[in-house]
Amino acid sequence: MRNRSGNLLQWMTWLGLALLVAGPNIEAQSGKQKTEEFSLGRAVNFALEHYPAVRVAIERVAAAHGGVGLAHTQYLPTSSLLWQSNRATANNIFGLLLPQPVLPPISGPVLANTSNRSAWGSGAGALASWEPFDFGYRRAEVNVARAGERVAGAEAELTRLDVATAVSNAFFSLLAAQQITQAAGANVTRREVFDKSVHVLVTNGLRPGADASRADAELALARNQMIEAETAEGVSRAALAEILGMAGTKVEIDSGPLLGSAPEQGLAPVPPAAHPAATALEAHVSQEKAREHALSRSYVPHFFSQAAISARGSGANANGIFAGGLNGLGLERMNWALGVTVTFPLMDYFSIRDQKRIEAANQRAEEARYEQELQDLSGQIAEAQVKLEGARRVAENTPIELKAAREGETQSRTRYESGLATIVEVAESESLLVQAEIDQGLARLNVWRRLEGVAAAQGNLQPFLELVRAQSKGGD
């Protein structure tokens, strides 16, 4: 009995120590489950810092920048070192071979007899070569690399714009879903109150039983609509969390000034050429021009200043006698040389000519794409401005719609309770009221959303985010 009591006491002691140690870890784990709250500006900045596509674009810019540095290395002289030791026969033969990579070269006189004897041979040397002038070819290659860097930078900005726009759209979608859910909830509350009053009237024999069934059906429909609205809100919340790279985390949003009146002043006009998509295509045009220019500079003579020092050793003598032992592993004869080598790719003319034709065609294609992009962007900006104006007009009209719907709903209820109206009239007024509440909840939000659409069409969301920030401070 004492052993059992002692074991139980020991077990409880160990359990208490384990809970004491695990307590901070449990609190830390529970802290990880805290809900993250984002304003629009914070959500955009967070995505731009963490979204994988942005990181990919940044690394491509870094790679393109490295390509510029690589192109600059062509200005540096080249230098090569060599050491070789081998054991081979010394059977030389008079004659000529065209340049090829298979037969090893051999030097020395032609011996009278062929022998299978071998001797040690060795060689070492250094060669330095530098091209003092190149008629602008290396500069053209550097310009090609710089054009590639500009392309990568412009495409990175376009990626940032796409990510920022996607996050902003997801934010607005969640905020709109919340407004619809709120209106659906208010509709359910009103219909529950009306449903109870109808049942009281039916119970007292003041209304037919069909009215109670109709009220129950309208209430069930309103609840279904609220469920659908809550589901849509959950989907929108999950979509925002996913694009923020926080899938599985509950994300809450701070609406800030987005549910209030938008400022009357719009965004400053921006030319379509400033859009990152247009900038990227313009960079592609410059890249094709740089490539064509580099090809024009490639069909020129190449001058190389060269300096070489070398030494060789061989265990095979010119008289055909082979020295034994380790003879030939040492460096017995040294030579040095200074000179200039000139090469000219004579027959490359035809391939370079065709390559220039290809690059010229690519350049014209990129120019056409650039012109088309400017047309498309101009149309998108004009369309966004029209949508903004329409959203402002709707926002001015929805308060009238909401006021009339509320008055109509109140009057229809009063008339129904007085026996002057049917339940169908009340149901229609309730439907008009919930629609008016949804329209009112979305009207001001849509003005902000259309402002964001103008900024996205112009290619820069920062002026819009600064406008939101300024409006938020003004509201404080």
Image (cartoon, grey):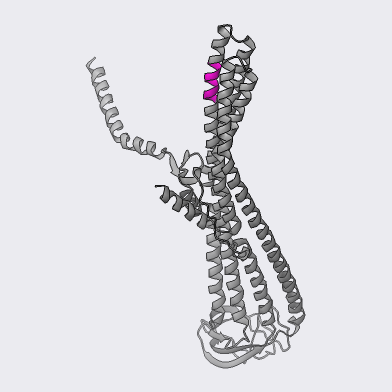
Q: Residue furthest left?
A: 2
Residue 314 visible in rendering = no
Q: Is residue 338 found inside the magenta-colored segment of the image?
A: no
Expressed as whole percent of the image width and height from the top left, the position of residue 440 reads 55, 38
Residue 302 coordinates in the image, percent (x, y): 64, 87
Q: Is residue 463 left or right of residue 416?
A: left
Camera-side residue: 220 or 442? 442
Q: Quadrant of residue 132?
A: bottom right
Front-most of residues 295 and 311: 295
Image spot of residue 145 (x, y percent): 59, 72
Magenta stretch contains residue 190: yes
Secondary structure of the magenta portion, mostly? helix
Please say if 330 is above or below 360: below
Bounds of the magenta segment: 188-196
Q: Residue at x 64, y 72 (%)?
A: 286
Q: Nearer the viewer, residue 208 or 252?
A: 208
Q: Residue at x 38, y 38 (%)?
A: 31
Q: Is residue 60 or residue 442 the one in the foreground?
A: 442
Residue 56 image-quadrant placement:
bottom right
